[in-house]
Amino acid sequence: MIIVDSCGWLEWFTDGEFADDYGRYLAKTEDILVPTIILYEVYKVLKQDFGEEKALLAIGFMKNCKIIPFDDSVAISAADIALKENLAMADAIIAATSRIHNCKIISSDADLRHLNNVIFIAKTGNT
């Protein structure tokens, strides 16, 4: 099981420069966990930049994966991780979900790069 961060989904849905790098991880939806915070981030950006129809189509595809709700155990774990790792709330929720489910995070988010369970896909200027 893996979590593909919102930056990866957005690259793939918008055919960005790194779409192929993320596409190889997105091929098997049955192996992907999607924390609800990632649904939020992807929907918001796609709706803002491309319209509601594209955003809803993307969410429909993402719902083929296993959606992980934001519950009390994720909330408490995320708060602890945010304090320890100095992460913003969304990143801490993603990190907590990955630790609870013992899976890797695929991301280009430099704030997550230092975590030991992250497979980091470097973008130009993103170190």
Image: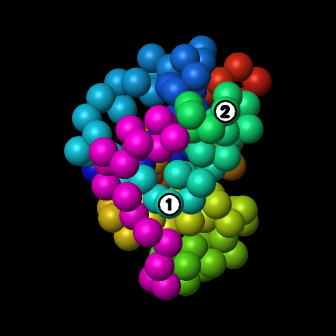
**Residue 44 among magenta residues:** no
**Residue 37: in sight, yes or no?**
yes
What mark, if any, has residue 36 been given in the picture?
1
In the rendered view, does 52 fall on the left or right side of 99? right
Q: Quadrant of residue 37?
A: bottom right
The stretch in magenta equals 56-73
Mark 2 or 1 closer to N-term? 1
Residue drawn at (26%, 45%) of the image: 31
Outermost residue, front direction? 53
Q: Secondary structure at mark 2?
A: loop
In the rendered view, does 18 fall on the left or right side of 34? right
**Which quadrant of the rendered structure holds the C terminus?**
top right
Q: CA distance from mark 2 to mark 1?
A: 20 Å
Residue drawn at (49%, 85%) of the image: 72
Q: Residues within 10 Å of mark 1 (few under 14, many from 20)?
A: some
Give coordinates of residue 9: x percent, y percent: 51, 35
Front-lying residue, 23 or 60:
60
Q: Which residue is disc 2 drawn over?
A: 51
Q: Residues within 10 Å of mark 2 (few under 14, many from 20)?
A: few
In the rendered view, does 90 fall on the left or right side of 107? right
